[in-house]
Image (cartoon, rainbow, N blue to C red):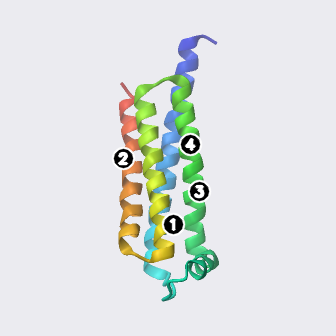
Amino acid sequence: MNAASETTKAQNGLRNNAIFMIGLLVIQYVLGMVTNMFVQFPDTDQAGQLWDFARSQFLTMSHIVVGTLLLVGAIVFVIRAARIHHRSWIASSVVGLIAILAAIFGGTQFITTQIDAYSLLMALAAIIAFLSYGWGLYASRK
């Protein structure tokens, strides 16, 4: 196999990776909206109780599990993009990873504080990640 076909194979793998990440982000966003609508956290300022409650809720745990999968996927994506030295994919994947980290930060802060601004941070960061992977798909077509 020659170098050009190796590069094409790696680029196709990154395109598939981006499509997978976009799909997971859509699932994550919907889970977040449904959780926001149907899960009522207890009125307490005890972080431990809030985390216990979060872990006992199927929707919230599903949201956390998908978020963890997104984090792992984003890290793998950055590594794969760096290995083939493709500038657009590197930029896209790094922005996506940073956005996912920001969303995770927002989520962990929201659970312990119940401050709506952290929920907004999660939503906006998810949109940024979605756009970054979409941009990567667009830029890699050139």
**Three-letter amino acid code of the residue under disc 4:** Ile
| Image: 50 above or below 67 | below
- The residue tagged 1 is 108
Q: Nearer the viewer, residue 36 or 26?
A: 36
Residue 133, visible in the rendered structure = no
Camera-nearest label, 1 or 4: 1
- Residue under numbered circle 4: 75
Q: Is residue 115 above or below residue 67?
A: below
Point out residue 36 in the picture as x, y percentages from the top left corner: 44, 76
Going 47% across and 68% down the picture, which residue do you hit?
A: 109
Q: Position of residue 138 (x, y in %)?
A: 36, 35
Residue at the bottom extreme? 43
Q: Is residue 71 above or below residue 18?
A: below
Q: Amino acid at mark 2?
A: Leu
- Label disc, if present, on residue 30 of the rendered structure: none
Mark whose residue sits in front, 3 or 1: 1
Instruction: Write the residue at 44% across / 45% down.
Output: 96
Mark 2 vs 1, N-terminal side: 1
The Cα–Cα distance between marks 2 and 1, rounded to whole angstroms, is 23 Å
Gap between marks 4 and 2, in whole Å? 17 Å
